[in-house]
Image: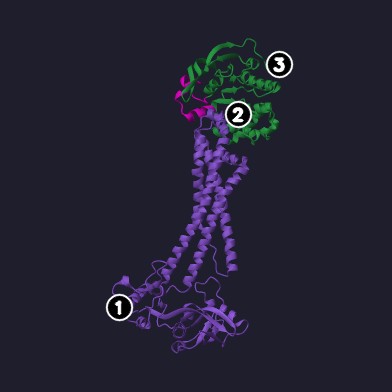
Chain colours: A green, B purple
Amino acid sequence: MNIIEVKNLRKSYHEGITSTVALKNVTFSIRKGEFVAIMGPSGSGKSTLLHLLGLLDEPTSGHYEFNGKNISSYSRNELAVLRNEKIGFVFQAFNLLPRTSVLQNAILPLYYSHIPQSEWEARGKAAVESVGLGHRLSHQPSELSGGEKQRLAIARALVNNPDIIFADEPTGNLDSKSGKNVMSIIQHLNEKEGRTIVLITHESSTAEHSERIIRLMDGEIESDEKVKHRLTPNDEYVK
Amino acid sequence: MTYKHIFQTSIKGLSTNRSRSILTILGIVIGITAIMLVVSLGAGAQSLILGQVQGLGTNTIAVIPGREPTSPSDVSSLFGDSLKQKDIVALQNKSNVPYLKSIMPTVIGSDTASYNSNTYQTSIFGATELIAEIFDLHPSEGRFFQREDVISSADVVVIGSEVATHLFDNEDPLGQKIKIKGRNFKVVAVLPPTGGGSLFNFDSMALMPYTTAQTYLLGIKYFNRIIMQSLTDAQVESTAEDVKLTLRESHNITDPTKDDFTVQTQQDLANRLTTITSALTYFLAAVASIALFVGGVGIMNIMLVSVTERTREIGLRKALGATDRDILSQFLLEAVLLTAIGGVIGIILGSSLAFIISLILSKVLSVDWQYVFPWSGAILGLVVSALIGLIFGGYPAKQAASKSPIEALRYE
């Protein structure tokens, strides 16, 4: 069963009279439970692809089936509901709310969900504890290290129990030790909890935690192959 | 997202930017406070003035010579000499004005009064013995001149408290003679201080029979004003009408537009004063609204900054599942909360200040200044401040809601 199926996905940006094509005719699919890394140099269109897959942006043309449903006819509201219920995001820049506690940051997606408020705290605590920040619940993001911030962002992505997690350069702002820690959590989510992961990175050492690497070049898929020697959480993480 | 959660989110948004929120509220507070103050003090002044007017009795009717002044330069109408003794006789005729209770011709003037070496510029008010009853005057010593004094043009005078202190220092004025225009007048009574709030300032007046004032001081045969009372309040209108008809007949006037007199009832005067004080209050309130408007622009400014500054937060919230409506509600509610809180504080502050000022005014001016809680000002203030929140917060909120998630997230 494929959670993601894209056909001839295309995205171009118009600015004045010039138009830039970020993605041309991209076609592939991702199975439920798969761990896919998207690689490519900057400008190759990997971020654009992730935003399209994560329903944050709409393609110029092409066909996109998410969870077996064609989402091209979905309204902005319906897309928001899908993002809330099925998708978790982890960003390179963390995007935590300042002056807001760790627990409150973690339960932010629940404000937009149908989950009753009585369950929020328990869910938030469980998510924060699962990334090893249980002792930091009432701290502010400014009191956390970079690695801890990204783990909090992962907890926030998990709190709605999503089917798929999109991670956009999650280790990009981290030192190697924190990066390794974050990658081991992400890998754990895939292997032990069976969540689908789509990860963007330009570091091969990070990409090799995945099962499959899609390489983009100038908006097109250059290669799409299985990882032969997959790294485990215990392997040395080299930046 | 439920309303409860929108509310929680907005409160959190405001409290994480506490100092900015407080400064924004301050603008609204100042605006609403100013409006409340103006409206409350205006209403207080109005009730004070109306109280004075109605103190004369609502059954009072006054006739002044000349037409109603049509403009400030229409002076001729003010100093007419059309009201004569024959008019009094005609008005006193029961078949002309059946419901007349009392009638009093009056004359006014101004002259220097002296006693020994002391002098004082007084207003001369000539009337009949009815003046004590009509104006509700009670001498602190002595007694008012009587009917016989009016008939005989007696040289008697009742002086106000200011006149007494200036002319007599610590001496007892009663029975002494003061000099006006070289003629001696015997002081038969002294009036107690009336305070500053009275329409007629009796404190600086010398009251005497109108016959005396006409003959010896003013040298005129006409009256400056005729004051009448109807039997009951309900008969004021018909009596005023009777007075007009009688005077027209007495003056041989057939065309009502050529009247050489004006009849005013106490109700007319009250209505006119109400119009004037209301107009003044609304004018001042309009001036005060400028402060409120500036406060509103402040809100818009802050909300725009807030939306721009929090664009990434908006993007994040959208990525996590917030709909356009969620974002719109959050920012709109933030703006409305700011203005509503400012409005409530402004109402409390404005009405307390007005209360304190009314206390001070009644103490310092020793007038009966009533504190009025300005309900209209309060409701207006609340509605206007909430509207300001909706309008000035609405535009930035709409801007915030219409951004696509990725556009907002990427915002630098």
Spatial CA span between label 3 and label 2: 29 Å
Residue under label 3: A236
Depicted A138 relative to depicted A236: above or below? below
Q: Is residue A143 magenta?
A: no
> Of helix, strand and loop, which one carries label 1?
loop
Chain of the residue where label 2 is placed in the rendered structure: A
Residue under label 1: B252
Is residue B320 something that shows in the picture?
Answer: no
The location of residue A72, given as percent across then percent down, is 46, 23
**In which quadrant will I find the C terminus of chain B?**
top right
User: Which contiguous range is marked in magenta?
Assistant: A55-83
From this viewpoint, which residue is outermost toward the left?
B254
User: Mark 1–mark 3 contact, CB under 8 Å?
Assistant: no
User: Mark 2–mark 1 contact, CB under 8 Å?
Assistant: no
Dividing the picture into quadrants, the one containing residue A119 is top right
| Amino acid under disc 3 | Glu
Residue under label 2: A159
Rendered image: mark on residue B157: none
Q: Nearer the viewer, residue A80 or B240?
A: B240
| Amino acid under disc 1 | Asn
Chain of the residue where label 3 is placed in the rendered structure: A
Depicted B185 relative to depicted A137: above or below? below
| Amino acid under disc 2 | Val
Are the residues under marks 2 and 1 on the same chain? no
Spatial CA span between label 2 and label 1: 99 Å
User: Mark 3–mark 2 contact, CB under 8 Å?
Assistant: no
User: Is A188 positioned to the left or the right of B86 in the image?
Assistant: right
Residue at 49% x, 64% y is B46
The location of residue B174, given as percent across then percent down, is 57, 86
Chain of the residue where label 1 is placed in the rendered structure: B
Spatial CA span between label 1 and label 3: 122 Å
